[in-house]
Image (cartoon, rainbow, N blue to C red):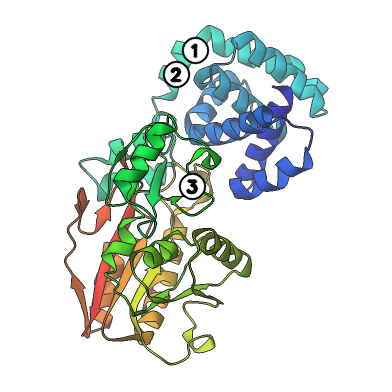
Amino acid sequence: MIESQRLASTAVSQVLAGRNLNQVLQSLLPRHSLLTPQQRAAAQDMSYGTLRFYGQLRSILDLLLQKPIQDAAVRSLLLVALYQLQYSRSAEHAVVDHAVRAAETLKKPWAKGLVNAVLRNFLRQRISLLEQAAASEEGRYSHPQWWIEKLRRQYPDDWATQLEINNQHPPMTLRVNARVTSTEIYLDLLHQQGIEGQQVGENAILLDQPVSVDKLPGFGEGVSSVQDAGAQFAARLLDVADGMRVLDACAAPGGKAAHLLELARIELTALDSDPERLKKIEQTLQRLKLEAHCLTGNAARPDEWWDGKPFQRILADVPCSASGVVRRHPDIKWLRREVDITAFAAQQAEILDALWRVLGSGGKLLYATCSVFAEENQQQIAQFLVRHEDAQCLPLSLPAMKDGQLTPNLQHDGFFYALLLKA
């Protein structure tokens, strides 16, 4: 546990200094080749969990300290240990003892007494401290105050529910490859392997419990993929048919591109601005035995990559705040700033205007985000329609969708969709 605590506290420190959690873990874990799989899993769980409940844990820690701790490593170690004491099944005495020893491995021997005292005080005063932390909205909901206020304005009926769902573990959903088998047959295969789930979409299976992909029957052969049920709506909403020329304009990591190819025999161009992320698309398509023209390019600069031949369908899954997927990426809550939403909206508008030029008459463009903020969604589309008289927004009807918006729930993450027809 000591090594896992130390790694998790290092990861949390780096995220709070502005780095992406996935990138931090991908950098940290390979440096510790002697870690057991259990230690790696524990370090990852502590990192994600501490950031998921950071607002509450920070409030509790501030109540326990007579003065702020300037040392980021020690502060993060305390946050990780508080997460364990409140949310893990680890023995309390072991968490405290190992955290004290972890302070020494971090070369902070001066902090051993402080760590011991703070954690034992939490155990003695737990109920009172939890109540005091919940007195502030950041402490109660573990989201930044600006985020809470924005949701309250835009979702007056269910803002608190969204915040609470954001702090839960994300569901694991599979997409069955329609070219290979049916959802019903694959459900039966899962059952034979002792894996239970339920169908929640035409090709979507929500698992009762997450499992490693190497336990999924036929995964390596392309029979199934992991993809959120909300994300699976994209390919079907785009309404592709055999022979169409289709562009996935911001394609990485390739899940939606692959789904399009599973639904119809199309001529697909998968575009992404990052060559490394483009490799992930190629790997995904290779596993699924699918083919597409994978191209490095900026969706906002079509003159640099477009061959001049119009597309009949375009998927514009644009960069966004990712405010609808914070269950999977809890660091987003603490890395995003309110001004970032304005910057994302400007980038989205630029991409939309550029892609509209390469869409043929009578073609359709599906605008998609994994955001729940109106500035990136309904407001973005309203402004686009003002700029483009030849654009019409087609009606969409999906379960639990309102004005194109899916909010996070127990079955899927948060997404927004708008289907635009070019007259």
The residue at 42%/59% (across/down) is: 341
**Mark 3 → mark 2, Cα distance in angstroms:** 46 Å
Q: Which residue is mark 1?
A: 126
Separation of marks 2 and 1 at Cα, in angstroms: 6 Å
Residue 87 x %, y %: 50, 21
Three-letter code for the amino acid on which mark 2 is drawn: Leu
Which residue is farthest bottom? Answer: 308
Q: Earlier in the sequence, mark 3 or mark 2?
A: 2
Residue type at mark 3? Gly
The answer to whether one can see residue 168 in this image is no
- The residue under the point 52% across, 33% down is 54
Q: Position of residue 204 (x, y in %)?
A: 33, 48
Query: Within the image, what quadrant is residue 264 found in?
Result: bottom left
Q: Is residue 354 above or below residue 82?
A: below
Tell me the quarter of the image containing the N terminus: top right
Residues at marks 3 and 1, CA–CA distance in whole angstroms: 47 Å
Q: Position of residue 271 (x, y in %)?
A: 50, 74
- Residue at position x 54%, y 16% in the image: 89
Residue 390 image offset from top left, x and y in percent: 22, 85
Disc 2, disc 1: CB below 8 Å? yes
Choose the circle earlier in sequence order: 3 or 1. 1
Q: In this rendering, would 150 be left or right of 254?
A: left
Q: Kindly indicate whether the residue at mark 2 contacts the one at mark 3 (C-beta within 8 angstroms).
A: no
Task: Name the secondary structure under disc 2.
Answer: helix
Task: For the C terminus, give its image quadrant.
Answer: bottom left
Establish if 365 lies above or below 303.
above
Q: Which mark is residue 130?
A: 2
Determine the image quadrant of residue 152.
top left
Disc nearest the viewer among 3 and 1: 3
The residue under the point 40% across, 32% down is: 192
Residue underneath mark 3? 218
